[in-house]
Amino acid sequence: MTELLQILAPILLVDIMNPVLLAVMIFVASGARPVLNSLALLVGHAVSYFLAGYLLSFGLDVITKWLEAPGSLEYALGGLLGVALVIWGAVPVKPDKNPDMPTWELTPLSCLIFGAVVAAVGIPFAVPYLGAIDQILKAGVDTTVMWYVFIIYNLGYALPFLVVPGAILVLGEGAKAWLDRLNNGVIWVADNIMPWLIVLLGVWLIYQCVGYFL
C-alpha cells in the first residue's frame, strides 16, 4: 500500500488544484456562520467524492474480474484515459471557475448537501481523480486495502481546503481579502500549470498501457 500511495501522491497534488471547490467554500464563508458553513460544505464534498471514487473503482474491479481479464482491461482503460487526458490538457478549454451559487439560505445542512452535489456533478470532469482510480485498479489490491487507500487519498485531498475556515478563525474580517488573493492564485495555477501536469499524467498512462501490451 505504501508504494501505491507514493504513486498517488503527485496525482493528488494535481487533484487539489480545484478552483471550483475553493470558490464555493469562499462564497459560503461570506455569509452567516462562515466557519461552520464552509466546514459543512467541505465535509459534504469530501464524503461524496470518496463514495463516488470508491464505488467506481469497486465496480470496475468487479467487471474486470468477471471478464477474467483484469490486467488487459485495466491497462486498456488506462490508455484510453491517458489519451483523453492529453487532449483535455492540450486543448485550451476554460472551465467555469465560478459555478452557479445557491440562492437559498445558507445553513450547515444546506451547505453539506450543496458540497455533495458539487462533488457528484464534478466527478466526470475530475480527470486527476480518474487517473488515481486507474492506478488503484492496476495495483490489484483487495477491497479492504482499496478502502483504506481511498480514505487516505480523500483526507489528503480535503485537508488543504481547511485553510478557508482556518483563515476566518485566525484573521476574522481580514480573511476575505486574503482568501480572494488565494483563490486568484489557484485559478492562475489551474489555467497555466495544471494543463501541463494533466498532459504529463496522460502520457504516463499511455506509456504504462503501451509497455504492458508490448
Image: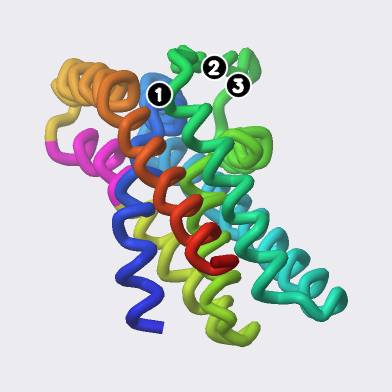
> Is the residue marked by circle 3 packed among few (<14), some (14-19), or many (20+) residues within 10 Å?
few
Compare residues 56 and 89 and report the one nearer the observer.
Answer: 89
Residue farthest to the right? 66
Relative to 160, residue 26 above or below: above
Expressed as whole percent of the image width and height from the top left, the position of residue 49 reads 58, 51
Disc 2 versus disc 3: nearer the observer: 2
Q: Amino acid at mark 3?
A: Glu
Q: Which residue is mark 2?
A: 99
Residue at 62% x, 41% y is: 123
**Residue contact at pointers 1 and 2, CB within 8 angstroms:** yes
Q: Position of residue 199 (x, y in %)?
A: 39, 36
* Rendered view: 20 above or below 159: above
Label 2 sits on a secondary structure element that is: loop
- Give the magenta range: 160-170
Q: Name the residue carrying label 3.
A: 105
Label placed on residue 86:
none
Q: Residue 188 or 10: which is nearer the viewer? A: 10
Q: CA distance from mark 2 to mark 3?
A: 17 Å
Which amino acid type corresponds to the residue marked 2 in the rendered image? Answer: Pro
Expressed as whole percent of the image width and height from the top left, the position of residue 211 reads: 48, 64
Residue 116 in percent (x, y) is at 63, 42
Residue 162 on the magenta span: yes
Q: Return the disc, 1 or 3, that comes first in the chain's sequence.
A: 1
